[in-house]
Amino acid sequence: MQHIEKLPEELCCKPEPLIVLSGLDIEKNSVHKSIWKAFTSGHSRERETFKFRCRPVDHQFPRPKVKPSAAYEWFLPKGILKTGWMRKHLEEIPAVVAVFYDLDWDERQWDEKSTECAQRLGIVRSKLAGRDSKLVLVLIQKRAPLPLGEDLNAMERAQALCTKCELLGKNLFVLSHTNLLYGCITRLEGEFHDMASNYYHTRAKKVKSHKDTLNKASHQLLFVRHEFKIAFFGELKKDPALALKHYQQAYTHLLEQRMIDIHMLEMKTVAGFINYKICRLAFQSKASDAISQFRRHIEFFSNLVGMPQVAFEHEAWMSRQFEILGDLFQEAIQLSLSALMTQHPGLYYQEAARHAIARRELCSVLCTQAASLSVDGMVVPPTLASDSSAVVSGTAGFDETAFSVEFSGIHPSTGSGAETQRGKKSGANAAVELVRAQSPLRFTRRSPSTPASPVTRSPPSSGQLDTIAGSGISATEKIDGLEFYGQRPWRQGIQSMEPPNAVREREGILALQKAELTVDHSAIIILLLEQTHLQYKRYKAERMKLYPCVLMGSEYYSKGNYAKALSCYASVIGDYRRDRWREIYTFVLQHIMKCAYFTVQLSAFISAALELIGSSSQLSLSEKEQIQRLLFQLFRREPPGTHVVPELDQMSEEMMESWIKCLSSSITTSSTSSESQSMDGEQVAQAEKKSRSTSFADLCSVILETNRLNVCGRFVY
């Protein structure tokens, strides 16, 4: 689940060529420190962007694996994409290593210094053994160089130094630490760019040569892996068109794999990675291609739930896919892309929230019953109930059927692909089907005969990968104990169709279910709904912006944060009252009254109660009579009973005291507030005495006038 909920940083960052600067003592040498700052300071648009790392001369780079000539003939892959591969090429294996050495052409101890320089270069070369990284020598000199051809001594010594260092003349550079420092560094960066492009081009050719030796019978996973590698090298080479082409080919090869439940998580994890890359690149050129790619992506995988015992993972993955596209869409808009009211990030955030809600309900169905095991020890999902809405509608959640007639019906679709091979559908699959049926984006199911041909591109992402140089983590090792993305920790490197150890499989599933119980689903849902509301508001979708507010109110209510829930409901009730949406209006008023009950807000409580007994409310006559009796009870200074909130057994003593205090002070204030400014102490006392003998009707009118309640029963339909 870790790579479902959070994409790896090395995937999200903008890949930049890794340049290692060796031989710089930036701690003690001020000249070296100024050179380092010149390389790493803020780059202008004219300068190339690199990832610079300062390493000592004796730094050991990752050693390449020794592969036999016929390595792929009998090789069976253990997974698709290794967890450390991207990080290795971003942080540990450089495209260029530049060795810096202080040496002037007129150095008196030239022989000793040049020998030391050659030794230093030899050490770095030995640490890079087996790698194709470009090695260059940069001489730090105190004087500005003379024009080419005028300094014969420099030419002779440069040739002798290259011979001694076994270095090509084009890989020897001079950096003058003078007023021309930044100009020299800019020219050096241009050379580094050409060398890095050549290095990554060579790496891509090597991978392609390996790919040409594969056969589809036993190396299907390697086709995906190799295409991904070529595309990633294309990004490092700053060739987005090449990268996009190979990411699309990698995605095509992935869709050709056999989709087996036990390996579905790995397939969907890698598919999500590749889809992210495609969409990100596509948004930079043609946004419609990014949207088309995402729709194909969702249509193909929406029905591939995987293992039913952990079906909540599928909803988590679906939610994350929509959220990622919303983020990419939003970033593209910030870079001048124009969005429409009918196509903007809010639609995707809303769909992400829907799947997050389904994830929570699946968790309540599957994980809370983790102790209910069958004979063979596997968790038994409940069978499909006659009313499938019971599976996905939580007690504290928002009632979709009360909210909109549009979403009131559930229309199960016929299964496709892997779903038709399963017998009875579990409650988990029913919940998945329900949330998909309610999608505002109207994604259609992919029929078995419809090929899922991937194409496309996506938006720019800005997160930079933090340096891990001092973290002690080697990119050649497993990341978080996993060798391949998306594989189960207890079943790594195994591609069989059945789990090799049934006991460990059961233990792993139970551990996943227990871990899911600790997830704060409401926090995830609320964040997505906040983004949804913000986007609808930005694109002036006046009615749709109310929808996430109601859902947020329900989430806050379920968390027990009644003040925020009341704020959410209060922000939309005016619109529903004005537009005369009776069902929603009644639903929101009921929840306002409940929230006011818990927060002891008399004004909001009475206002909601009076509106609920008005003609605009859709409550039954008996329910209105009950609320009317409740109001009479309040006017007698008696706290409201627990029948306001049916799920509450009894009122706590603290809440009882709060209500008594509130009622007492409100009634006193109501009878004296309008006259307090012109009365003396004796008159106030008489007014208070009068209030206790005031008739019920007079007392009621005083309260309504003082609190300025919002009564809307006067609306006629």
Image: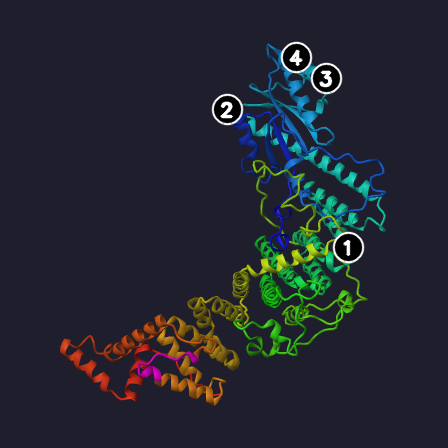
Q: Furthest residue to the front? A: 375
The amino acid type of the residue labelled 4 equals: Asn
Q: Residues within 10 Å of mark 2 (few under 14, many from 20)?
A: few
Mark 4 and mark 3 lie on one chain; the one further toward the N terminus is 4
Q: Label 1 amino acid?
A: Thr
Location of mark 2 (residue): 28
Q: Which mark is residue 163?
A: 3
Judge from the rendering whether residue 424 lies leftward or rightward of residue 599; answer left or right.
right
Crowd rating for badge 4 (residues with CA inside 10 Å; few <14, some 14–19, many 20+): few
Stretch of the chain drawn in magenta: 633-643
In the depicted structure, whether residue 179 falls above or below residue 538 = above
Question: Which residue in the structure is indicated by mark 4?
Answer: 153
Residue 182 is a magenta residue: no
Label 4 – label 1 distance at C-alpha: 60 Å
Q: Which mark is residue 252?
A: 1
In this orientation, which residue lies closer to the viewer: 635 or 13?
Answer: 635
Q: Nearer the viewer, residue 435 or 162?
A: 435
Q: Quadrant of the N terminus?
A: bottom right
Point out the tag, 4 or 1, that comes first from the N-terminus: 4
Q: Which of the marked residues, 1 or 2, is nearer the chain's N terminus?
A: 2
